[in-house]
Image (tube, grey):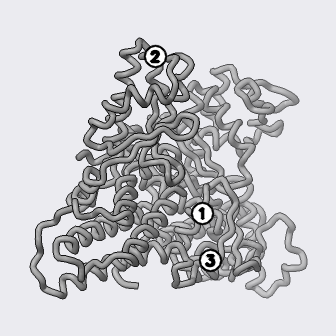
Amino acid sequence: MSAVSRLDEARHAIRRVIVDFLEDLGLADLESLVRVEVPTEKGHGDLTTSVALKIRGRAHITPQELLDRLGPSLRLLPSVESVELAGPGFLNFTLRTQWLVQVVAFIRENSDRYGNSDVGAGQKVLLEYVSANPTGPMVVVSGRAAAVGDSLARAMSAAGYEVWREFYVNDAGQQIAKLGQALALRLRELDGEEVRSTWPQDVYPGDYVIALAQEYRRQHPGVRGVDLGPSRHPDLGAWAAERIRVGHEEVLAQFGVTFDRWFSERHLRDAGAADAIIERLREHHSLVERDGAIWFQSSQFGDDKDRVMVKSDGSFTYFVPDAAYHADKFDRGFDYVIDLLGPDHHGYVSRMRAVVQALGYPPQRLEILIIQLVRLLRGTELVRMSKRGGTFVALDDLIDEAGVDPARFFLLERAPETPMDFDLNLATLRASDNPVYYVQYAGARVHSLLRQWRGLGQPEVPVDLRLLQSLEEREVIVLLARFPEIVARVAQERAPQHLPKYLTDLASAFHSFYRQHRVLDAEPNVRQARLAMAEAVLRVITRGLGLMGISQPEEM
């Protein structure tokens, strides 16, 4: 059996029979219409195809006639038990249980690579995610981006992509000067001045700057607040931004997220990349001067309007270093560049694709996923739980209360582009209503079974998987067979929410089996087959949770 999927073997064999039939009819050009898929609802077989509907007009053959003519060949396949016509023209396939059960043996022999595939074909992908500004603590929506990006990177690596993980540090520009001004004000406050009543409206007010000021004073005991005027704000801001960035790195490591590179905007600017990108766009005839400013003609590339790149005073807009950074990404030879951006970046998508196209790169090679907001709730009550002042909720506060595993599972449950509610009451509940507990408990239950079996000291008998014949066992086995397809789907669709849904379904099927069937006190041959199936469940749950950055405890 291949390492890809037992279901894929059946899918390809069924598709080959249908394609050969079309070629015999002289309709080889319809091959692209032949898709054999896993049905989205139960009761529609193990695999299904709508090809009878799609070719009906060209082939002049009804769905029933197609089934009558294809049926004998399809039923000769070792994987196919039966094929039935359903609805207006769907062919639904039930696979042979005794053919499917071999997936259990394969998982047990190849647990470290089961779920892997080569659908990515070695394509180089740069995943940039989180990229939170180093002007304050890491917030929960950035934690959602971290969970999504990290899980995507893991799944895409398993699916055969070559993945590079990057965090873009916005450590330059006006926001850093404002951070430095906030630090200067807090230092003056440490010297006994009253600054709160005159605090500038656009300067960071959070109490976390007090801790920065205290650390700065310990490192620079001779520097007083009165010595830190506006000319020192950029230097103070750079110092503070690096301390905050280190804090981001630490909390993300606690969250199980690491990066191959932390890419500094300041270093990009210092290397002259901003001037270079202006020159490159000028060479591509994509810039125009208006009212003393230099505009990028992004409307020529699908944007809703042109964008200023150099203001009339000669300063760059924030768009320039972003454009330079993306040029750098593509210049490094990545096949795909994927950005995970916050909910306030919708307008960013079209202008950045315009820059990529203007520079001569295929715009479809830039993918931008918008990560939507997270609301923290206790039941129905909105939670404000920051310990540092300001209006944000910090990621490390969430980790402290909910834990890494529940936080990551909950943040991955919904499609990234969908706003979500995070119920702290549910996340901290140690019961089956908590989805991560429910999944982990299935794995812990298998660990317990295996410990009990080893404790009995009974001799093993040969494993005969053909004894796995009940409906509950079959449901578990079909789900086990689907795992490689789920991983590939997460990678190709950039949709990690499929993993928690799949694992919940697998856990549910296993719990249902366990409630209705004896394992340790079953007849010896049946017992060994069921233990083998349970071990396969444990290995797939462990691997699936691992792709989400979540642990599988041995006891709960």
Report if the CB atoms under discs 2 and 3 are less than 8 Å apart. no
**Callout 3, which amino acid?**
Tyr
The 10 Å Cα crowd at callout 3, few under 14, some 14 to 19, many 20 or more, is some
Mark 1 lies on residue: 144
**Callout 2, which amino acid?**
Asp
Q: In this view, does 437 lie to the left or right of 4?
A: right
Q: Is residue 155 left or right of residue 77?
A: right
Q: Earlier in the sequence, mark 2 or mark 3?
A: 2
Q: Is residue 351 above or below residue 40?
A: above
The image quadrant of residue 513 is bottom left
Residue at 54 percent across and 44 percent down: it is 338
| Residue 266 x %, y % | 60, 51
Viewer can see residue 219: no
Q: Earlier in the sequence, mark 1 or mark 2?
A: 2
Mark 2 lies on residue: 29
Mark 3 lies on residue: 216
Q: Distance between the residues labelled 1 and 2?
A: 44 Å
